[in-house]
Structures are given as C-alpha cells and as structure tokens.
Image (spheres, helix red, strand yellow):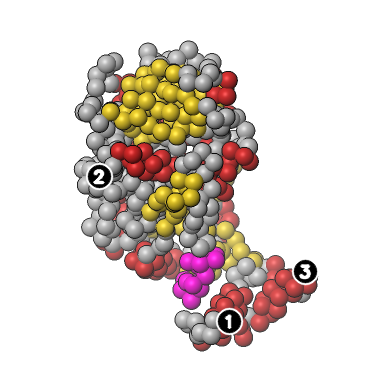
C-alpha cells in the first residue's frame, strides 16, 4: 500500500513489526523480501515518486573537500534513491575483499565471501542483470576473449553486467509493494528523531514529518536505517547527540572510514590488438563489459590494492601528453613554483606542440586545426581504484542546519599517500603482463599525478564505510547481522556497513546484504527481543 504522509492526521501513530527508514535499493529490496510474510512492514521515504528540487535540497552538505562532489548531486531523495540515475554497473566482490589483509589497515569483514555468495544470485535478479552469473570462464569465450590473457602471469579479465535500461528499483520493484497486504510505503515521510529506551537498550519509536510542520510516530519491534552511505551516518550521529553515543558510537566510529571509488585515466595502453575494441557486448537487454584486474595471488604476494581497468579507444588529441603538461606548467608557474617532472613536461610541450595548439584553438576560437587530432592513437584505462579505509576520512555534523532543524553534514576525504603509491605499484605489475602477453605497452602517467588526484579525478559516487561492520564495537558500528552495537533492535542496510569497498560498484553487494538481512529478520521469532 502507498500512503502519502501529507494526508496523515497530526500526531498519528503507526504500529508495525519492522520499520524501514529509506526507500533506495537496500530498503526496496528488504521490503520486497519481507513482502508476503506474517510481519507488518512500514517503509518510510523522505520523497515522493519523482524528483522534486525543494526536497532534493535537504541532501546539500555544508562543506566538502575541493574537487569532491556535493552529495546533493550524487544522491536522489525520492523512492528508488540513487538507482534513479545509476549506470547499473554490477560485479560481485571477491573472496579477498572480505579478508583481513595485513598490508591494509582496518581491512577484514566479520563475514566471509561464502556467507554472502548464496545471496548474489537473488541480488542479480533485483538488479535485472540475469541469473547466469559473472563467471569469466562462461562469458569470455562468448565474447571471443578467452585466450587474450592465456600467457598472463599477474592479471585476468573479469565481467561486469548492466541491464538496459538501467534498473530503477522503485519503478521495477515498487508495484508489488504498493499492492502488498503487509507492506505499507509512506512517501514524504522524512525521519527526524528516534526514541531510545536506555534501560531496555531498544528503539521505541521513530518520529517523522511530511514537510508540513506536523509530526507523526512509528512504533515498531525493529528498525532498519537504509538511507544511503552518507545519510545513515548523518542520522545516526544526530540521534547519538541525544543519547551520548550509545547507538553504536561509544568508540566514535560512526561517520569514520568513509570511502569512495576514485576514478581516473592514469595510464595509456599502446596496442594494435584489435580485440581490445570488443571488450563490451550487447546481450539482449543487458550490456556486458570485460575489464582487467590483478589476480588474488599477485595482490597477496605484492601486497597491493586492486584496480578495475576497462579499456576504451582514444584519439591522438585525447592521448596528448603536451596538453596535460601545458596545464600543469601553467598552474605551477601561476603559483611561482616548478612542478615535479618539470623537464618531462617541458619536453612534452615541445614534442606535442601541434596538439597543444589544437587545444588552444578549440578553447579560445571554437575551431579545429589538425585532422590528425581525431586519429585513433591507443587506449585509455578509465580505472576505478580501491580505497583504503582511513579513520580520518569521515563525515561529521556541521553547526549549520537544514529547514527541518537537523544539522547538515560536512565531509573530510582524501586519498592517502599509501593509497596512491599502491595504485602506481599495481599499474606497474599490470604493465608487466601487457608485455608478457604481447598486448602492448602500458605507459604510466605519473607526471600527471597533481591533476589525476586533483581536477581530473572522478568519482564512483559510492559512499561506503561510515557505519562499518565489525566483530566488536571498538572497531565498528554494526555486527555481522548488521545490527547496531548496543541496541537490541536497530539495523543498518546499505554500503555504509562495508568495512572495505573493493574496486567494483557496490549495488550488487548492497542488494545481496539486504536479502541476507531479510532472512535474518524473518528468522527472528515474533516477540523475541534480541540482545
């Protein structure tokens, strides 16, 4: 059933067995898994069924680091959440992603790959990428790529899948909830408070508003925060201000270990292997992409982070070293400094003068000069980088408040020097395989580092780690069942519980964890109070 929160009477009280706070991929999946059970479920979402600018503005942050996007851009505050504008790119995590790695501080999940693997098939159904898995042994022969890496020693090809058009979780999976006899969706229901019984260590009620000055309550046996990687932490920080950190924050972990996936073109591949132009394939209503990654064996032996490395063809203009060097030299000279790799940049400027002139002509005069600029010159690697979980990468509450009187969030985020160096080392290892396999020559663009980790850095907009899963409350916020430490009936769903973020988009794993959480909630006997 779908209910407009604006139609409720002032002070109305809703009673339910499970209250889900947030209607993005995690919340929609969880509600569907509980649909048809003997549990009464209320799902509260802050928005309606379509984008509305006056509601979207509540995602605005007070401050973010330079070059980092404001979450108002990457998040969507209506039913379906960020799935309303995602690319639907999905891959599972690998077994190594769940393990404690002694060269990566704060790594390790309290669950293993085998605990989550049974749920990936159901997650793929929700993402609408098909039930035929992600096995490279199955897909690469169909793409005629199975022998491309047969001589490789350090890397391999893996598969990502996306549905076409991308799956919008509420549009695709909301109808069954609207028609459900036991699931009630409340739209325009923005949560503003939780009531915590400190003696019983349980959440008693959630208070929400429909942006009309009126407040309403939900009484429930269990509550699940599923508002996204930033809002889960923001709201938990707000609630903890009233309860002195007793909601999973007695060790000051809420909001910390914030991770994203930096994306960048940090290497060029010079190759005449034409099959590199066939690394993607349309398969019915799906889009398949083969991408390079390092093997688990070399990641362990060389103590590296992983990189997701698809390849795309690039023109002579796009591959130009001179254009990038021109910008780096210009920016440094404006500051009265000499950049790192000065002589390399100076040489690039001279040797690549035609493409520098081309760039100036395009920008200043909106004209093209050299026909050679459009010639194919090689391949770029728009890679996605695994980020190390750093405690000081965090979100915290600002003193500024939104129109509901709730503190806005501020973001502190950076890519550590260790993370950067491990990225370059991983690329060096991958470069060896390009030579071994005779695919081509990989050229690392270290001299561009100031821009790669500055104005040219992109983002997956994958907000992870801010309410991390752990064996103990000293090291995390939720346990292996996603239950908040110190609270008997509060759970968190979504990528905020990820201790590490792998190098693949998180939605498939978010969905798998949500299906697993639903099984846990359905397995809890009625009236049983978890401790």
The reply to whether the C-beta atoms of the residues labelled 3 and 2 are less than 8 Å apart is no
Q: Secondary structure at mark 3?
A: loop
> Can residue 452 be found in the magenta stretch?
yes
Quadrant housing the C terminus: top left
Residue in the foreground of this view, choosing between 341 and 352: 341
As drawn, is 231 to the left or to the right of 376? left
Q: Nearer the viewer, mark 1 or mark 2?
A: 2
Please say whether residue 451 is visible from this viewpoint.
yes
Labels 1, 3: front one: 1
Label drawn at residue 334: 1
- The disc placed on residue 388 is none
Q: Position of residue 116 (x, y in %)?
A: 32, 36
Question: Is residue 473 located in the magenta-colored stretch of the structure?
Answer: no
Report crowding for label 3: few under 14, some 14 to 19, many 20 or more residues within 10 A (C-alpha).
Answer: few
Q: Nearer the viewer, mark 3 or mark 2?
A: 2
Residue 197 found in image quarter:
top left
Q: Secondary structure at mark 1?
A: helix
Q: Of the residues under marks 1 and 3, which one precedes in the sequence?
A: 1
Q: Position of residue 381 (x, y in %)?
A: 51, 61
Q: Alpha-carbon distance for marks 1 and 2?
A: 47 Å
Query: Which residue occupies 28% across, 49% down?
Result: 252
Gap between marks 3 and 2 measured at Cα: 58 Å
Give residue 375's quadrant in the image.
bottom right
Q: Identify the residue at image location x=40%, y=51%.
A: 396
Residue bounds of the magenta highlight: 444-456
Name the residue tied to disc 3: 366
**Position above or below: 241 against 171:** below
Mark found first going from the N terminus, 3 or 2: 2
Residues packed near mark 2 inside 10 Å, few (<14), some (14 to 19) or many (20 plus):
some
How far apart are the two marked residues, 1 and 3, measured between alpha carbons?
25 Å
Q: Secondary structure at mark 2?
A: loop
Residue that label 2 marks: 250
């Amino acid at each position: 059933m779908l209910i407009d929160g604006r139609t409720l009477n002032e002070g109305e009280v809703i009673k339910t067995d499970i209250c889900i706070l947030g209607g993005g991929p995690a919340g929609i999946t969880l509600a569907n898994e509980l649909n048809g059970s003997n549990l009464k479920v209320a799902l509260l979402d802050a928005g309606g069924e379509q984008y509305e600018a006056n509601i979207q503005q509540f995602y605005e942050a007070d401050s973010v680091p330079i070059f980092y996007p404001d979450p108002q851009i990457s998040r969507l505050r209506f039913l379906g959440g960020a799935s309303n504008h995602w690319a639907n790119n999905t891959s599972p995590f690998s077994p190594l992603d769940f393990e404690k790695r002694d060269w990566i501080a704060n790594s390790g999940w309290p669950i293993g790959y085998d605990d989550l693997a049974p749920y990936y098939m159901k997650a793929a159904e929700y993402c609408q990428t098909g039930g035929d898995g992600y096995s490279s042994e199955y897909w690469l022969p169909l793409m005629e790529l199975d022998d491309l890496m047969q001589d490789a020693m350090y890397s391999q090809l893996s598969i990502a899948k996306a549905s076409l058009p991308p799956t919008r979780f509420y549009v695709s999976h909301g109808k069954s909830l609207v028609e459900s006899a036991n699931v009630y969706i409340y739209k325009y229901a923005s949560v503003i408070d939780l009531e915590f019984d400190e003696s019983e260590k349980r959440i008693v009620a959630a208070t929400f508003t429909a942006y009309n000055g009126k407040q309403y309550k939900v009484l429930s046996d269990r509550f699940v925060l599923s508002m996204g990687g930033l809002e889960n932490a923001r709201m938990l920080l707000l609630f903890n201000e009233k309860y002195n950190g007793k909601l999973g924050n007695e060790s000051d972990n809420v909001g910390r270990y914030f991770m994203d996936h930096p994306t960048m073109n940090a290497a060029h591949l010079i190759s005449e292997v034409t099959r590199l132009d066939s690394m993607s394939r349309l398969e019915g209503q799906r889009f398949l992409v083969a991408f390079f990654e390092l093997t688990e064996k070399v990641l362990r032996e060389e103590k590296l982070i992983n990189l997701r490395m698809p390849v795309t063809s690039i023109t002579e203009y796009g591959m130009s070293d001179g254009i990038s060097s021109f910008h780096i030299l210009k920016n440094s000279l404006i500051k009265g400094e000499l950049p790192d790799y000065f002589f390399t940049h100076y040489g690039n400027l001279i040797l690549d003068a035609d493409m520098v002139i081309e760039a100036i002509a395009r920008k200043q005069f909106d004209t093209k000069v050299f026909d050679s600029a459009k010639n194919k010159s090689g391949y770029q690697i728009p890679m996605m980088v695994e980020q190390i979980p750093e405690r000081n990468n965090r979100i915290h509450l600002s003193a500024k408040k939104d129109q509901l009187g709730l503190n806005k969030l501020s973001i502190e985020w950076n890519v550590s020097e260790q993370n950067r160096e491990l990225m370059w080392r991983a690329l060096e290892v991958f470069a060896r395989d390009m030579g071994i396999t005779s695919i081509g020559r990989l050229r690392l663009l270290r001299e561009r580092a100031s821009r790669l980790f500055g104005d040219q850095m992109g983002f997956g907009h994958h907000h992870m780690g801010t309410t991390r899963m752990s064996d103990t409350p000293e090291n995390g916020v939720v346990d292996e069942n996603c239950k908040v430490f110190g609270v008997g009936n509060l759970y968190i769903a979504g990528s905020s519980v990820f201790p590490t973020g792998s190098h693949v988009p998180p939605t498939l794993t978010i969905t798998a964890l949500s299906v697993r959480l639903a099984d846990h909630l359905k397995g809890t006997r009625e009236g049983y109070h978890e401790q």
